[in-house]
Image (cartoon, grey):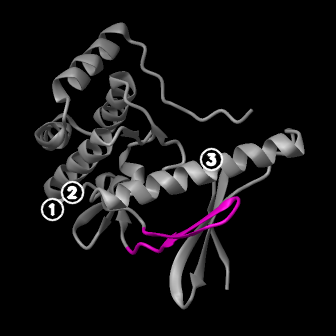
Amino acid sequence: MVKKISEGAEAVLYSSELLGRACVIKFRCRKSYRIREIDESIREKRTKTEARILATANSIGVNVPKLLMVGRFAIYMTMLDGELLSDVLRKNANDKIENILEDAGKALAKLHNANIVHGDYTPANIMICKGKAYIIDFGLSMVESAAEEKALDLLLMKRSLKRKQYYIFENAYSKLSDNFKTVKERLESIERRGRYQTRTLIAN
């Protein structure tokens, strides 16, 4: 049985089963305004990129949904049972949040050390499962070594958290980051320039 969970600008999420195991299917939808051949090429490439990054993230010790199967335009992942950090923060439920923020900081450092930029690293894409932080939705992720892109991941979290919460997150990130000083300096530079823009993936 396939059931729609949510629908975004680029993909639809479904809950289903694969070999008797609960799973989530992320299907990249067709864009009718694009030439069919170009549309299929873009969707296929982005699906493969996201799946590859998801598998890499898992291999370097980041808690993410486990990749089960990849189709031409679809990714099959394990179903996570938990609550979004954004929802917990909205309810002002601070129990054990410190540990989650530390987990999230360490996870981002591991991703950045592998030159993986998430692209939308916010509490809405961090799920709390069994007391641990799981990173979800790598739809905007990319393989990128530039400090500026990594700094933007930090800035998204900084703008989403209270000062004390962000300090906990950044402190955990700094302990594992291979180039924290450079990324931190770039973050401060971006803030001084006032050029912060939320990265969005523009479908052409």
* Res. 87 in view: no
Specify which label sits upstream in the sequence, 3 or 2. 3
Identify residue type, mark 1. Lys
Residue 189 shown in magenta: no
Q: Are marks 2 and 1 in contact (CB under 8 Å)?
A: yes
Instruction: Find residue 96 and name its label.
Output: 1
**CA separation in Å, label 2 and label 1:** 7 Å
Residue found 82% across the figure and 40% down from its top: 38
Above or below, comparing residue 139 to residue 12 in the picture = above
The local secondary structure at tag 3 comes to helix
- Residue 34: x %, y % from top left: 85, 39
Identify residue type, mark 3. Arg
* Res. 13 in view: yes
Residue found 36% across the figure and 52% down from its top: 86
Which residue matches tag 3?
46
Specify the segment rendered in magenta.
66-81
Which residue matches tag 2?
100
Residue found 33% across the figure and 56% down from its top: 85
Which-is-in-front pick, marks 3 and 1? 3
- Taking the image as shown, residue 172 lies to the left or right of residue 13, namely left
Identify residue type, mark 2. Ile
- Residue 45: x %, y % from top left: 66, 47
**CA separation in Å, label 3 and label 1:** 35 Å
For residue 150, which quarter of the picture? Answer: top left
